[in-house]
Amino acid sequence: MHPPNGWTGQTASALQTALRMTNEAFAEHLGVAVRTVAGWHQNPTLRPKSEMQRILDSTLDRAPQPARDRFAALLAELVAAAEPTAPLVPRTEPDPITALDAEPDVRAALDWLDRQAGWRPGTSRREVETRIAATDPAQLRDRRARRITASRADVADALGTYYGSATGDHGRYACTYGSQRELVTSILTHPDWLDLACPLPSEDHLTIGSTDPSGHAPLDDEAAEHAAQRLAEVLAVGGRMVDLPLYRLHTIQPAPGALNGTFGLSHFLRYALTLDLLEDELLGALAVNAASTPGSLPLRDRYLPDQPSVLNLSGRLCAGGALSLTVIARAPGPGRPARDYLILVQERSGAVINAARRLAVIPKGFHQPMADIRGDAHLAATLRREMEEELFGREDIDGTLTNQLAADPMHPSRLSEPLRWLDQDPARMRMECTAFGLNLVSGNYEFACLTVIEDEEFWPRYGGLVTANWEATALRQYSSQDPDLIGHLVQDAAWSNEGLFALLQGLRRLRQTSNGRVSLPPIEWGLR
């Protein structure tokens, strides 16, 4: 049985006890930092949010029966101690119907769906409840597992079939690493959008054009039914949706050395129930070897039917993010006779909504405000936040895990020790935007960036504190002086398309500014 009122630090620790795992083993099992598990023991009333709740639900569901029995006994003791007169109500699955009324973000999604579909109030709730009853969670998990077997190249090829070859000055980003075969991605880009070498934040002139999040085209019946099905499936497997604000791109004018453009505001649920459905539709077609041509993918035919619709930023919801290749300068050491850059790559977990089970650069995140809507519109704000969250263990700024209560979450007094040290001397770290593109998978904008920690003292001081969060299952290390191993990395079929885009553009820029730390072959791009 699951905790009747959701997971807390106390019940998560009880699950660890039932599984008979150490802090380190339990953290590895969940794909979180050891400090997260230790924090549950120190703060029993802490309530993990959203994705972490789902991860704990799934961990219990997959546990061997003896461990499940031990957890049930421990949970009964905890409930009895907290409320001696209240009987424990057992259940074998999280109750998705309760979430329709109990979770504010779900209620907000239902209200939005009623309005956008032109339905009478309450219609979407009935539609979702009916679909939940018809959904088998086990079959749904199996279907999702089959869909993520499609490789990066499979996705890129299918979208190439749907949208055709390059037209005009826009085309899909392709690249060669030395003499290796050409790699073609799903990133629609332009020659003026590549090799930007734009210093961040100094030459980032991205601004807020409108703070009104209400604009969105009405949903026709088919689109509304798909949105209701997405809600039902998320709830049926115990998932939760957190309706955080997102920056919606309206205009963009990248140029070498500078970024100009405007954002508006939208919300995650509007993206999750519309454009984000396109990826699942495409993966579903690939899983059964179905056609991926115009007319064969109804949602894509509606939202992004051709290249002009992808480029029409102001006429559609264009969410997206910033992702950065992070490299760290190192002095010569055992097995490393020359100075180099340590290159970090993440293996994404299955719990994330974007690039699940794929390789990606790190950090990677949606571009969204935390507290300062205008100030956070700059890419460096998102990259610094994601560094704190994905590399330096700042769980308090992860909006999917905790409520954000700090007036200034990135105030110098709240920074992690590694980032505070980097900020003490601007020469220790530099950030650049290397390229911009639109991902044909869901129409997302992708700002590919490069983060270079230039001070060799950083890794001896803080390398042991660099730890991925729940979004990754592992971090990989590569040396900028190892062209063969990086060549194998570039060809790995597990890459996400946007991750490979950022990796190649980052390596290309690093090669230009290496100061003797890089030994890589030529990296050349083209449009297909």
Image (cartoon, rainbow, N blue to C red):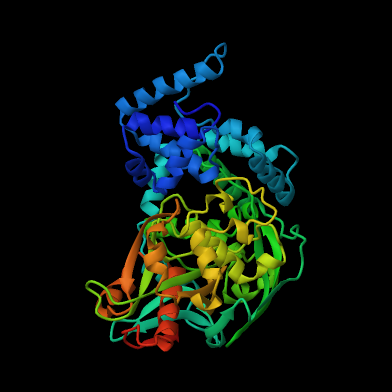
**Which of the 4 image quadrants contains residue 381?**
bottom right
81 left or right, relative to 328: right
Q: Quadrant of the C terminus?
A: bottom left
Name the outermost residue toward the left.
335
Q: Position of residue 340 (x, y in %)?
A: 33, 78
Residue 350, percent from left and from top? 41, 51
Return the residue found at the far top. Answer: 85
**Count of marks, rendered view:** 0
Please provide percent x and percent y for residue 444: 56, 67
Please name whichever residue, 303 or 418, is drawn nearer the observer in this view of the structure.
Answer: 418
499 shown above or below 357: below
Q: Position of residue 224 (x, y in %)?
A: 64, 50
User: In the figure, 128 relative to 421: above or below?
Assistant: above
Give me the residue at 35% from left, 23% from top: 69
Image quarter of the N terminus:
top left
Report the side of 456 relative to 298 (left or right): left
| In-front residue for pair 61/313 | 61
Residue at 53% of width from left, 40% of height from top?
48
Write the residue at 37% across / 49% down: 145
